[in-house]
Amino acid sequence: MITFSDLSFAAPILALTVTVLLVMVAEAFRVGSSRFSFFLTLTGLTAAALIAGKGAGTRGAAFQDMVVVDGPTSVLTIIICGTGIVSTLLSRSYLELRGSHRSEFYMLVLFAVVGMILMASAGDLIIVFLGIELMSICLYVLAGFFRTRDVGNESALKYFLLGAFSTGFLLYGIALVYGTTGTTNLSLIGSAYAGVANQPLFLLGVGLLMVGLSFKVAAVPFHMWAPDVYEGAPTVVTGLMATGAKTAAFGAFAAVFLRTFDPAGSTTADVLALLAAASMVVGNIIAIAQTNLKRMLAYSSIAHAGYMLSGIAAGSVEGQNGVILYLAAYAATTLGAFGIVGWLERETGEGTSLEEYAGLSKHQPVIAALMALFMFSLTGIPPFAGFIGKYSVFLAAVRADMTWLAVVGVLTSAVSAYYYLRVVVMMYFREREGDVIRLPNFSIMLALAISAFFVVVLGVLPSIVLDIVAPGL
C-alpha cells in the first residue's frame, strides 16, 4: 500500500511526472505550444530541484525500500535536475534555428530526467534497471531527434544497439545476484554479502553488473559508442548525455558497489581500479588527436569516468564524497562547454572543429572567457571546481592504499592540459577568417552564466555539496 510518506519521499519524481503530463496536455490543446512547453519544463525541473534540496536533511526509504532518500541521493537529484535545466535553456534557440523546436523534445528530456533520478535513488536492483531503461529509451530517441540527418540516425542506432546489448549483461547480473542472495533489495543484499562474497555465481553476477554500469559511464573497454554518439547527436542532447546520464549511472554505481558490495580491499576494488586507470589513459591519449570538439569532449568524458571510478574503487565514504563532488563540478563545466559548442555550431552540423574557435576572443570576448574558464576547470587548474573534484577522488584513492591509481590520474591530467589549453590558445592567439559570429541570446547566456557560477563557487566552497551529503552517510 502506498503511503503519504512514500509520496513525500518521491516528490521530485512526482513533480516531474506531473510536468510531463501537463506538457502533453499543452501539446494536445495548443497550437504552437513549444514555447509554453519550454517554460513549463523549466518550472517543473526547478520545482523538483527545490523539493530535493528542501528534503536533503531527511533520510528514509519509500515504496518498500525500493527508493532511498538521503544526503547523497538528494545531491544527485539536484545535479540531475540542474543538468536538465541548463540543457533546456540551451535547447530552445538551438532547436528553433534548425526548425525542430517541438514539445516532444521536452517530454523526452523530462522522462529521461525521471529515469536518471530513479537510478540515483535506487534501493533495489529492479529500480536500477527501470531507471536505466526509461533514461536510455528517451536518449535513444533524442540522439536521432533530427530525423533528416543521417549522422544523427546513425548515432541513435549505434547507441540503441550497444545499449540493448549492455542491458543484457545488467539483467544477467541481477538474475545471478538474486539467485545467490534471494533478493534484489540492495539493503538485504548488503546484509547477505559476507555469506555469498566468495560464491562463483555471485561474483559472476557482480562482474556482469559492473559491465552494464560501465557501459553507461563510458568506461574503457566499454566506451566505443561514446565518440560516435556524442558527435552525431544534437549538441544539447550530447551535453545531457555527458552529464545527467553519467551522474545517474555513477549514482547507481555508488549504491551498488559502495553501499552494498563493500569493495574496499577486495578483487572487485582491483578490477574497478584497472577500469579507472584504463579509462584515464585511453581517454586522454586519444583526445589529443581529435580536431572535432565534440569528439574531443567525448574522449574527455571517458577520461573523467576514470577519475570518478577512482573514488568508487577506493570503497570508502571519502570516495563517495569525492565522486559526488566531482559529478557536480563535471556537470557544470561540461554543460557550459557543450553550450558554447552548440551555439557556435551551424545548422548543417559544421562549426565544431577546433579551427572554428580561432580569434573568438576578439569577436566574442565574454564567450571566449567562459570557454577558457571551462577548459581550465576540466584540466583541473585551481581554484576552479574541476581541481577540487580531482583532488577529492585522488585523495580517497591514496587513503585506500591505491597511490598508484592517484599517480596515474595526476599524470593523465597533465596530458589533458595539452588538448584543453589548445582550445584557449586557438581563441586568443589565432586569427579568425570568415564572418563575424552571431550574438548568443538570453537563454544561452543564462545557461552559461549558471554553469560558470557553479564552476567558480564549487571550486572555492566545496562544502556546499559536502554539507548536504554528510547527513546521509
Image (cartoon, helix red, strand yellow):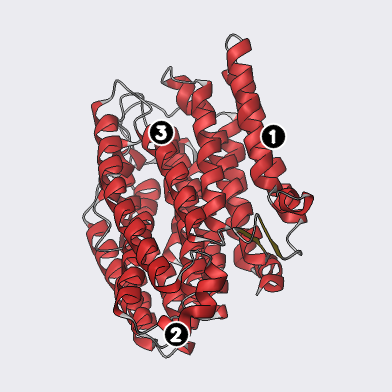
The answer to whether residue 26 is above or below residue 453 is above
**Residue projecting furthest to the bottom:** 401
Task: Provide the secondary structure element on which disc 1 rests.
Answer: helix
Say which amino acid is labelled 1: Thr
Say which amino acid is labelled 2: Gly
Instruction: Tell me, for residue 142, which label it has, or none.
Output: 3
| Between discs 2 and 3, the one toward the N terminus | 3
Instruction: Tell me, for residue 280, which label it has, or none.
Output: none
> From the viewer's perspective, is 219 left or right of 71?
left
The answer to whether residue 294 is above or below residue 145 is below
The answer to whether residue 213 is above or below residue 445 is below
Q: Name the residue that disc number 2 marks.
A: 195
Asked if the residue under mark 1 is in contact with the one under mark 3, i.e. CB atoms within 8 Å, the reply is: no
Relative image position of residue 445 (x, y in whole percent): 58, 37
Instruction: Tell me, for residue 43, which label it has, or none.
Output: 1
Relative image position of residue 224 (x, y in whole percent): 23, 53
Which quarter of the picture shows residue 434? top left
| Between discs 1 and 2, the one toward the N terminus | 1
Say which amino acid is labelled 3: Leu
Residue 462 visible, this orientation: yes
The Cα atoms of the two marked residues, 3 and 1, are separated by 21 Å
